[in-house]
């Protein structure tokens, strides 16, 4: 199976700009998750989709963040009016709602806001 | 209170030796899952092993085994015959069944940095 892929791998932007990240899950995985990881910490949950429905959002996901998963395949995470505090690794994971429902992660997108 | 506690920020192990990475968790749920992930410097989170709360046997996957002590709420990862490629961050994570939400988000600890010495 092809693993989870994310694009871009690195993004450098200036404060106030909008950025969009893409995640392609493992094919046939119906659940998709976004996490954010800052230096020295474990990943923190942002949001979760089952098929195309966004079922849960963390309080970490401010109004400047929006995520979509049209057609239940790939997903995008957009950050509007970026702030320096948004600098982090953004990780996407997918799982199949069956068995252990293990989440498999992509390589992440490292965002640097100048 | 933290849901996942990893008390060892860093660990060293000699190549070919075994090492135990500690993880304790806090939950009031009866049904939950525990996971260990490896994160090399490249950043990708690599799934290693899973233990369900109702599993009676400790999970094993190749050189990885999970020492699950439910009463003590601990889920330590044991790596046997350490290799240089095992040098990485290791994260313990828990999935609880959220009442009514059906969410299956993972809650992670802060990780342990393992360094394997030749």
Image (spheres, grey):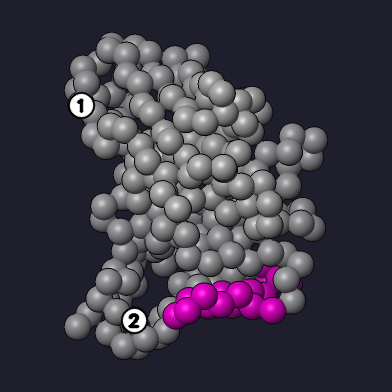
B30 over A51 or under it: above or below? below
The residue at the point 27 percent across, 84 percent down is B15
Q: Which residues are magenta?
A: B57-73
Q: Nearer the viewer, residue B100 or B112?
A: B100
Q: How far, Cα to Cα, is label 2 from label 1? A: 37 Å
Q: Which residue is mark 1?
A: A12
For residue B34, say whether it is visible.
Answer: yes
Residue A10 lies in what quarter of the image? top left
Q: Position of residue A63 (x, y in %)?
A: 50, 14
The disc at residue B110 is: none
Q: Position of residue A32 (x, y in %)?
A: 54, 37
Q: Is residue B90 left or right of residue A49?
A: left
Task: Determine the secondary structure under disc 2.
Answer: loop
User: How would you rate the neighbour count of disc 1 (Cα within 10 Å): few for under 14, some for 14-19, many for 20 or more?
Assistant: few
How many numbered marks are there?
A: 2
Q: Which residue is mark 2?
A: B82
Q: Position of residue B71 (x, y in %)?
A: 73, 72
Q: Position of residue A96 (x, y in %)?
A: 61, 47
Chain letter for mark 2: B
The residue at the point 38 percent across, 29 percent down is A22
């Amino acid at each position: 199976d092809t693993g989870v892929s994310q694009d871009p791998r690195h993004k450098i932007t200036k404060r106030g700009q909008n950025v969009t990240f893409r995640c392609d899950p493992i094919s046939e995985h119906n659940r998709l998750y976004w996490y954010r990881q800052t230096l020295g910490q474990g990943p923190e949950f942002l949001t979760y989709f089952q098929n195309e429905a966004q079922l849960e959002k963390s309080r970490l996901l401010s109004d400047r963040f929006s995520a979509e998963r049209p057609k239940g395949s790939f997903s995008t995470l957009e950050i509007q009016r970026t702030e320096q505090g948004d600098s982090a690794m953004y990780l996407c994971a997918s799982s199949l709602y069956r068995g252990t429902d293990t989440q498999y992660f992509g390589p992440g997108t490292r965002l640097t806001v100048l | 209170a933290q849901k996942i506690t990893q008390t060892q920020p860093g660990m060293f192990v000699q190549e070919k030796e075994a090492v135990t990475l500690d993880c304790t968790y806090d939950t009031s749920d009866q049904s939950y899952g525990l996971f260990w992930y490896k994160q090399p410097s490249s950043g990708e989170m690599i799934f290693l092993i899973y233990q369900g709360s109702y599993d009676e046997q400790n999970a094993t996957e190749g050189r990885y085994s999970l020492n699950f002590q439910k009463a003590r709420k601990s889920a330590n990862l044991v790596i046997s015959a350490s290799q240089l490629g095992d040098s990485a961050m290791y994260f313990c994570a828990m999935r609880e069944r959220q009442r009514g939400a059906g969410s299956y988000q993972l809650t992670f600890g802060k990780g342990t940095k393992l360094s394997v010495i030749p």
